[in-house]
Image (spheres, rainbow, N blue to C red):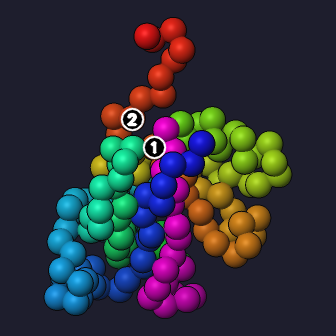
Amino acid sequence: MLTRIDHIGIACFDLDATVEFYRATYGFEVFHSEVNEEQGVREAMLKINGTSDGGASYLQLLEPTREDSAVGKWLAKNGEGVHHIAFGTADVDADAAAVRDKGVRVLYDEPRRGSMDSRITFLHPKDCHGVLTELVTAAGSHVQDPQDH
């Protein structure tokens, strides 16, 4: 079950300048930054607020580290702007299977490593009314087995 908007991904040409804009304009500070070589991006997560399920909502700023990355190709075609929306879930595997069963194309056969050691997968934008959609299980999240109590 999806629990929250985890983050909104924003593609940018200059990560440092974009971080400075959000800091100076809205007071948002970088909560986490990293380079994800597999996805070919340098990113900064700006924490907006905490949520009742222990998660948080973020803006994820993404600068490609190479032109052939998904974000690099998207920027070349579309320019800067909202790239995707991500929903938090306690179990990305189960929720990806559930939406796949409803006819939505899931882009990865198995979830991959995302920001802050999360587990992620994406849903095809043509099946989601033009919106690239990500499902995210935060690192350390645990799906409780009924036998665990």
Per the image, the residue denoted by label 2 is 141
Instruction: Identify which residue is drawn at 41% across, 51% down.
Output: 114
Question: What span is colored magenta in the figure?
Answer: 74-90
Locate residue 99 relative to residue 84 in the image: left or right: right
* Rendered location of residue 72, percent (x, y): 46, 77
Locate residue 25 relative to residue 7 in the image: left or right: left
* Rendered location of residue 127, percent (x, y): 76, 64
Q: CA distance from mark 1 to mark 2?
A: 7 Å
Quadrant housing residue 28: bottom left
* Rendered location of residue 144, percent (x, y): 47, 22
- Taking depth in this image into account, of 77 and 104 the one nearest to the observer is 104
Mark 1 and mark 2 residues within 8 Å of each other at the beta carbon: yes
What numbered label is drawn on residue 116? Answer: none
Instruction: Identify which residue is drawn at 81% across, 48% down.
Output: 102
Per the image, the residue denoted by label 1 is 137
Compared to 136, does 43 lie above or below?
Answer: below
Farthest-out residue, front: 52
Quadrant location, the C terminus: top left
Instruction: Identify which residue is drawn at 48% across, 60% down.
Output: 5
Residue type at the position of mark 2: Ser
Locate residue 63 relative to residue 95 in the image: left or right: left
Q: Secondary structure at mark 2?
A: loop
